[in-house]
Image: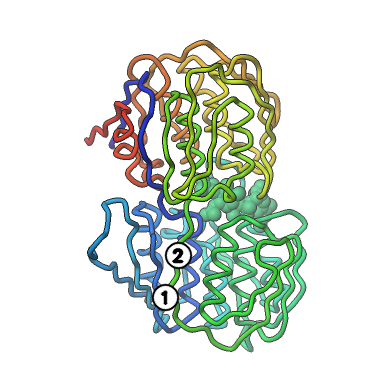
């Protein structure tokens, strides 16, 4: 299994190109099941999760062509996928495939909408909490689906097609909103989705669905209105920038000091996180090309932050902020409200010398003067990258084990960081 070796202490200086968002790419690829025509997705990141979803869609009969290099392509350019679900040959998503990636459960919506049936394995628990699918099932039922749960599978049927309905989510759910949206676009009549998630990736998928001929309004608000259509077409769509990758590198620069341009990204995708960084004393400047982040060695100020659905501070940046606050000049508090068990990084950050005390959903972080390298490992993607950024600021060598988590969500991490002066290398085994 690959490992990443980091020798900390260098400031980061230079440019980091930001990739297309993983959490938009996955539902966009899944939305290709809604049409027999070709969906062309540009700016697709090279990630293990994307490759795994290619396999999963392939099982339903989807063909995916990856475009070759074009004149002017930079090594950092995302890939272009031509995705064609001309004939769906199988409406079952088996346990072996769904258990490897939770988002693959979402195929239930387009399969049901287009084929009138779907049988999808329950995704099961995962390292960051129980993560049930009750709200996804509720949304499908509101659109007229009959649902049975049998042998670990959710079996959904709508032999006469789905019909529009009113869906009101009791809590904000990204997965629930994606599923409701993908099911509603081909339902007869009007669907209203209330208390919809407003994450930018939802807006990106809705924009793409509209390019495919859907009629979704209220994009960017918590009330989405969908007028169903009978058929969707192909379209061409570029995946929006990855706000979590952006925020992660911004925090890395805040931790090590230095001056980095985060290229091809937009501040409005993560304004709450940038505001928090500014409160720590980090300079954040929007530019025409992206976002410039700089810190000149001044002390990091502690902050109190609570995660919340968009536009609040994202849970997917909670671990990285905790790493940053471990070097703050004072005590900070971070409260996690989205997932009940998303603190696996705490023990690992402690190996590097961080002082963190957990009490329920709140972590109290007493800033220390310095961190020291150590062997670490983590059990999820964002926790793993928090260890990487802590290691960049720590004295001496850190070995990050279980790198496959990072490969699921960060494209060319070592290359992007080493170009800015970090000492970081992958050790393959
Ligand atoms: C998405 O997960 C993201 N994944 C997560 O990113 C992200 O952390 C999360 O949204 C919150 O922003 C993708 O987009 C692929 P939810 P999702 O449905 O959709 C509860 C990463 O590292 N809930 O908004 O699964 C649930 O347990 C990942 O990239 C129910 O109770 O999140 C959680 O507490 C990790 N019943 C809360 O809602 C349901 O039926 C929010 O979950 C569904 C969810």
Q: Nearer the observer, disc 1 or disc 2?
A: 1
Residue 215, percent from left and from top: 63, 79
Image point 40% across, 54% down: which residue? 49
Indicate how the structure is coloured in the image: rainbow
Which of these two is toward me, 310 or 140? 310
Q: Residues within 10 Å of mark 1 (few under 14, many from 20)?
A: many
Residue 39 got which mark? 1
Q: Please tell me the numbered disc located at residue 94.
A: 2
In-front residue for pair 381/371: 371
Report crowding for label 2: few under 14, some 14 to 19, many 20 or more residues within 10 A (C-alpha).
some
* Percent coordinates x, y for residue 57 in the rendering: 40, 69
394 sits to left or right of 304 = left
SS at mark 1 in the image: strand
Q: Residue at x 42, y 75 (%)?
A: 39
Residue 192 position by quadrant: bottom right
Which of the labelled discs sits on residue 213, or is there none? none
* SS state under label 2: loop
């Amino acid at each position: 299994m690959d490992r990443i070796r980091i020798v900390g202490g260098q400031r980061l200086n230079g440019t980091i190109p930001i990739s297309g968002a993983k959490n938009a790419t996955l539902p966009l690829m899944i939305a290709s099941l809604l049409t027999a025509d070709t969906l062309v997705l540009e700016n697709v990141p090279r990630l293990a999760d994307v490759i795994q979803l290619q396999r999963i869609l392939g099982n339903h009969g989807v063909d995916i062509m990856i475009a070759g290099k074009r004149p002017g392509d930079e090594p950092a350019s995302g890939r272009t996928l031509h995705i064609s679900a001309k004939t769906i040959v199988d409406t079952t998503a088996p346990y072996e495939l769904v258990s490897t990636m939770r988002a693959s459960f979402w195929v239930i919506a387009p399969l049901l909408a287009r084929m009138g049936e779907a049988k999808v394995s329950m995704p099961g628990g995962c390292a960051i909490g129980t993560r049930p699918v009750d709200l996804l099932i509720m949304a499908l039922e509101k659109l007229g689906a009959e649902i049975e749960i049998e042998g670990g599978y959710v079996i959904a049927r709508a032999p006469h097609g789905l019909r529009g309905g009113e869906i009101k989510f009791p809590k904000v759910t990204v997965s629930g909103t994606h599923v409701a949206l993908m099911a509603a676009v081909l339902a007869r009549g009007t669907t209203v989705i209330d208390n919809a998630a407003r994450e930018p990736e939802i807006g990106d998928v809705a924009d793409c669905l509209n390019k495919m001929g859907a009629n979704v309004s209220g994009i960017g608000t918590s009330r989405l209105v969908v007028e169903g259509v009978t058929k969707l077409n192909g379209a061409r769509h570029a995946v929006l920038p990855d706000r979590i990758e952006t925020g992660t590198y911004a925090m890395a620069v805040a931790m090590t000091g230095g001056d980095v341009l985060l290229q091809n990204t937009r501040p409005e995708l993560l304004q709450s996180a940038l505001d928090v960084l500014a409160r720590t004393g980090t300079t954040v400047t929007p530019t025409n090309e992206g976002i410039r982040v700089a810190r000149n060695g001044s002390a990091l100020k502690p902050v109190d932050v609570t995660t919340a659905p968009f536009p609040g501070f994202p849970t997917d940046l909670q671990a990285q902020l905790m790493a940053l606050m471990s070097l703050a000049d004072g005590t900070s508090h971070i409260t996690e409200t989205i997932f009940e068990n998303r603190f696996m990084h705490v023990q690992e950050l402690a190996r590097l010398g961080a002082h963190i005390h957990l009490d329920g959903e709140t972590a109290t972080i007493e800033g220390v003067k310095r961190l020291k390298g150590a062997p670490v490992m983590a059990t999820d993607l964002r926790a793993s990258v928090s260890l990487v950024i802590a290691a960049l600021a720590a004295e001496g060598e850190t070995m990050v084990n279980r790198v496959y988590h990072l490969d699921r969500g960060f494209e060319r991490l070592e290359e992007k960081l080493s170009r800015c002066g970090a000492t970081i290398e992958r050790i393959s085994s």
